[in-house]
Image (cartoon, rainbow, N blue to C red):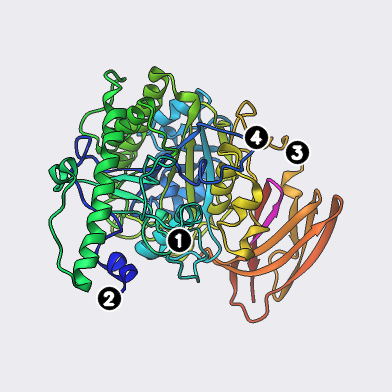
Amino acid sequence: MKRRDFLQKTIPAATLLPALINGYSVKAFAADSPLVQALMQSTTDTDHVLVIIQLSGGNDGMNTVIPISTYSNYYNARTNVAIPQNRILALGNSGAGIHPSMAGMHTLHNNGMMKVIQAVGYPQPNFSHFRATDIWMTGSNSNQEVYTGWAGRYLNYEYPNFPIGYPNTATPDPLAIQIGSTTTLTTQGPAVNMSMSITNPTSFYNLLNGTTDPVPNTPAGKELKYVRLVSQQTQKYSSVIRNAANAVTQQATYPTGNSLADQLKIVARLIKGGLKTRVYMVSTGGYDTHSVQVNAADTTMGAHATLLQRLSDATKAFQDDLIFLGVQDRVIGMTYSEFGRRIKSNSSVGTDHGAAAPMFLFGSKIEAGVLGNNPTIPTNASVNDNIPMQYDFRSIYATILEKWFCIDKTVVAGLYPPNINAQLQSLPLFKSSITCNAVTPPPPDPTFDSIITNSPNPFTESTVIKFRTEGGHTLIQIIDTLGRVIKTLLERDYLTAATDTITFNSGGLPTGIYYARFQNGVMQKVRPMLKVR
C-alpha cells in the first residue's frame, strides 16, 4: 500500500492524542494558515481571525430567519411548525425576523454586530449530508469529486514536503490544528491532511526522552515509522497550545450545559493567549429535524428552539468574552449548515432536506443588517418546493478572504473551479474601518423591484425578461423549484449601465414555478415566473 493510500484510508494524516483543553471538540487552522500567512506576498499584514461554526444536520432556515413581510405564505406552507408572527424578533425594518429563542443574537444585531445573509447555496444543491458537507468544505461544484480542501490546497502550495522536516525554525507552529478526534476535509492536501488532531497523548515520555520503539525493516514498519513522525510533531505542537491556554486566567461568563459555548470559550482563550492561528472551526449537531421539530402545543418551543437558543446564547457569550478580553476587533464569526430545509413542512411535525438557507456573520467589524430579500414562497407550496439561491456560498468565502484576510483577488479565485470565478461577488459584509478595503453597500434603490421583470407572466412557452444592469459582470440564471440552476440564460460584461432584454424559451420544461436569478456586482434579485399550459 502506498504511503498516501495508507494515511488517507487508515488515519486522517494526524495522530490521535489527549485533549489538551478539557476534551472539547475545537478545530483551529493554524498559525501559518494560507488564509493569512501562507501567501506572505499579501500587501497587508493582518492579525484577523475567523471562527467558523458548523451547524451539522441541515438547519431549518425558514424557522431561523422568518419572512415577516410574506408571513401568510410562510404560515400556509408550514402550519404545524410555523412560529407565531407576534413572537418573531424583528430585524429592524428589513421585513425579516429571527426565532424567539435567539434573543442573544438579536441583541448582537441591534448592537450593530451581526449580519444575516439570506438564501445562501450553490447552483446544483445536493441533499446528502455527507456530500453537501464535502461541497462546503472543498468549495467545489456539486458535480465534481474533489478530494482536497480549499485551505489544504493553500497549505500544500506553501509547504509541499509536509510533514517531512516540520516543525522547524522558520515554521515552529502547526500548519493547522484541530482539537478533537476527527480531521476536517477543509485542510486536506493532495497527499496528507495538513491539520493535526489532538486528543490523547500516548508517546509523551518517548518524546521527552527523544526515543521511539524500534520498528521492523519491512514496508509496514516504514509506514509505522512515518505515523510516529506525525505523532511526535503533534506532541511538539501541544506545548504551543498549552502555553496559549495557560496565559489566560479570567474570562467572561458562558452558559452552562452548552457544548458549543464550551468550545467557543476555548477559542477565545487561545486567541487572547497569543496562538497565531487565523481560522478556528467548532461544530454542533442535531439540526436534522425530520420529525417533532417543535412542540405541538407551542411551536416556539421544542428541539429546534433548543438548538437555536444554544447557538444564540453561545455566540452572544463568545462576543461578550472577546470584548472582555479586548480582542473583539480582530475576530469575526460565521455560521453555516450543509443545507436548509424544504419550504413545506411534513406530516411528522418536521421539515425535510432542502436547498438554500441563511448564514450569520457576527463581530464588531461586521456591517450589521440583512443582506438579500425574504425568499419567494409560493401561495400553494408543494413538498418539492425549495428556496432558490440568492448568494453562492463561495462568494461569502471569497469576500472574507479578500476583505478580512487581505488576500489578492487572483489568489482567492484559485480556490474555486474556473467556471465559478467570474460569478464570485465581493459582498458588503464588513465595516469600512477594517484594514482591508470593505465593500460599500449600495444605496437603497426605490426602483429595486423593477431591476428584473418578465412579460408575459404567467407564460406558456416563452417570456421576455427585462433587466437593468449598472455595467460590469451581469448574470441571469433560471432556477427550478428544487433549487437547481437549470440554465444560465445570460452571462456577459456590460461596458456601461444599460436596460436590456432576453427571452427565456422554456422548451420542454414542465409547467410550474421557475425563478430568474439576476446578479450584477453586489446586487441580485430573484424573480418568480409561472409557466402554464
Mark 2 to mark 4 CA distance (whole Å): 49 Å
User: Neighbour class for label 2 at 10 Å: few (<14), some, many (≥20)?
Assistant: few
Kindly tell me whether residue 180 is visible in this rendering: no
Tell us which disc is closer to us: 4 or 3.
4
User: Neighbour class for label 4 at 10 Å: few (<14), some, many (≥20)?
Assistant: many
Question: Quick one: which residue is furthest to the bottom in this view?
Answer: 508
Question: Circle 2 sits in a helix, a strand or a loop, which is it?
Answer: loop
**Mark 4 sits on what residue?**
438
Q: Is residue 493 left or right of residue 161?
A: right
Marking on residue 531 = none
In percent of width and height, residue 77 lies at 44, 55
- Residue at 29% x, 36% y: name it: 263
**Mark 3 sits on what residue?**
446
Mark 3 to mark 2 CA distance (whole Å): 65 Å
Taking the magenta stretch, the answer to whether it contains residue 207 is no
Q: Quadrant of the N terminus?
A: bottom left
Marking on residue 1 = 2
Which of the two discs, 2 and 4, labels the residue nearer the N terminus? 2
- The kind of residue tagged 1 is Ile
Determine contact: label 2, label 1, CB under 8 Å.
no
Mark 1 to mark 4 CA distance (whole Å): 27 Å
In percent of width and height, residue 346 lies at 35, 60
Which of the two discs, 4 and 3, labels the residue nearer the N terminus? 4
- The kind of residue tagged 2 is Met
Which of the two discs, 3 and 2, labels the residue nearer the N terminus? 2
Tell us which disc is closer to us: 2 or 1.
2
